[in-house]
């Protein structure tokens, strides 16, 4: 693997780990879940949210692909990358917790 593919894997794993940590706070804070949720209700958010946030983390890789020459555009792309990641992370949390904690 070359350096570019290694950095993509690091970015994806970091994004997935961030999603896992955040959704774990919500999931493991539930002490007595309703019986309607079923015994395996934690699986959906713990799988879906990290996967979606890993995809959202690819927005940070895009800033390395564009490489603008002016500092203004570099800053603008960095801010856009953060906003895209936060939006995708939020969507992942909503989809993961849908029908359980996000009702």
Image (tube, helix red, strand yellow):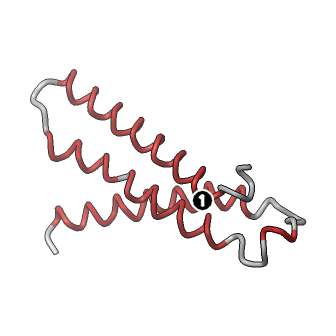
Q: Whole-percent x and y of residue 24?
A: 66, 62
Considering the image in quadrants, where does the N terminus appear?
bottom left
- Establish if 34 lies above or below 62: below
Which type of secondary structure does the marked residue at label 1 adopt?
Answer: helix
- Establish if 71 lies above or below 26: above
Q: Is residue 40 left or right of residue 55?
A: right
Q: Is residue 82 left or right of residue 29?
A: left
Q: Is residue 68 left or right of residue 9?
A: left
Q: Nearer the viewer, residue 71 or 65?
A: 65
Q: Nearer the viewer, residue 90 or 4?
A: 90
Query: Label 1: which residue?
Result: 96
Displayed quadrant of residue 76: top left
- Establish if 63 lies above or below 11: above
Q: Nearer the viewer, residue 19 or 2?
A: 19
Q: Extreme bottom residue here?
A: 39
Q: Whole-percent x and y of residue 51?
A: 46, 64
The residue drawn where x is 34% and y is 58% is 11
The residue drawn where x is 12% and y is 32% is 68
Q: Whole-percent x and y of residue 85?
A: 42, 44
- Establish if 55 lies above or below 38: above
């Amino acid at each position: 693997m070359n350096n570019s593919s290694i950095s993509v894997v690091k970015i994806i794993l970091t994004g997935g780990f961030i999603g896992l940590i955040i959704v774990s706070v919500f999931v493991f804070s539930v002490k007595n879940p309703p019986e309607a949720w079923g015994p395996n209700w934690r699986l959906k958010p713990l799988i879906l949210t990290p996967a979606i946030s890993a995809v959202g983390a690819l927005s940070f890789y895009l800033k390395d692909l564009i490489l603008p020459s002016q500092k203004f555009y570099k800053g603008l792309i960095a801010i856009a990358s953060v906003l895209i990641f936060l939006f995708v992370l939020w969507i992942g949390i909503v989809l993961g917790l849908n029908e359980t904690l996000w009702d």
